Every structure is written in C-alpha cells, then in structure tokens.
Amino acid sequence: MSESLTNTLASTSELIAALSRIEINKMTPAELDLAMAFSLAGVRVAVPIFEAVKLENDKIFVYTNQQWRPFSATSNWDDFGLVINNTQLVMSTHSAANVEGAPAPYWYSAQASFGGTKFNAGTDIRIAVGRAVASLLRSLK
C-alpha cells in the first residue's frame, strides 16, 4: 500500500481523496481492495452492506454483523463475490489467443454501467473490477 495511505489514520473522505490521487492503473491490489471496501460501505457506489471501513497496519477491515473482519477482494473470492453482486458493473472475458506475446490466453474488462467510467482491463478479473470500482468512486465526487 502506498505510503500516503499507510501514514494516514484518516477519515473516510481523506482516504478516498488519497486514493483519488493514485493513477488507477498503478494502484496496488491493497489500494484496489480499499476502494472496493469503501464502495460496499455505501460510499457513492454500491449497495451498502458494510457499516464502516478501517485501515489498520496496512490491512483493510470492514464492520458487518457487529464485528470487524478482514477484507481483500483481490485475493479472497468470497469478498470479490460481494463486490460483483452489489455493484453495477459490466464484465467480460476476451480471447488473447491471436495476440502475439499475450501473457495469458484471456484478458478481462470491467466497466461501471453508470457514472461514465472508462474501460478497465487486466489479466485478473479481480484487478479489472477493482479498477472499474476505483474509477467509479473517483468519478462520483
């Protein structure tokens, strides 16, 4: 996670502002996780299913069912499922079979279906979705 985020025990609005200053394609998985956690806490984007989000020792925690629990949609498929089930996204798988030097046989895209976000792609669907959510979070100031 970038130093600008870890050195800040900030409010939600300050953390979102810090996330907004990072170029989306350069965001780390942890920074994308933070953006997705905020979206699921009802910060501008998704159906709220978490009551709060906190950053503690470079780990993201969400408050739900009267307890704090870790959250990492880029590495935990259950957390990722919460994101795609509660955020209006369009996702797609594309063949890279005919692309010389392609790192994988497929690449993925995700785009928010409202808010005018740009097309975001990657070789991991969780990263592509994280970028789309981060872009949407940024566009709905």
Image: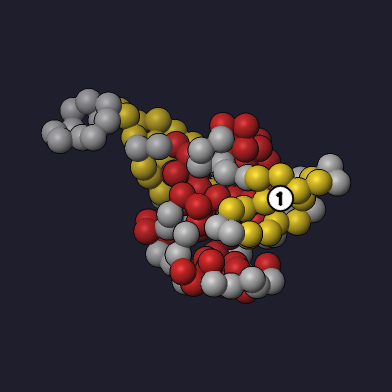
Residue linked to disc 1: 62
Q: Residue at x 40, y 64 (%)?
A: 23
Residue 135 at least partly seen: yes
Of 38 and 7, nearer the camera is: 7
Of 29 and 38, nearer the camera is: 29
Horizontal relation, residue 39 to residue 105: left or right? right
Q: Residue at x 86, y 46 (%)?
A: 66
Which quarter of the figure has residue 71?
top right
20 is higher (above) or lower (below) than 60: below
Identity, as a three-letter code, of the amino acid under mark 1: Val
For disc 1, the neighbor class at 10 Å (few under 14, some 14 to 19, many from 20) is: many
Of 129 and 57, nearer the camera is: 57
Q: Residue at x 42, y 57 (%)?
A: 27
Residue 81 x, y percent position in the rendering? 61, 33
Residue 103 x, y percent position in the rendering? 23, 35
Residue 80 x, y percent position in the rendering? 58, 37
| Residue at the left extreme, as displayed | 100
Of 12 and 6, nearer the camera is: 6
Picture colour scheme? secondary structure
Q: Residue at x 15, y 35 (%)?
A: 101
Which quarter of the figure has residue 64?
top right
Residue 134 x, y percent position in the rendering? 52, 56
Residue 88 at least partly seen: no
Horizontal relation, residue 122 to residue 131: left or right? left
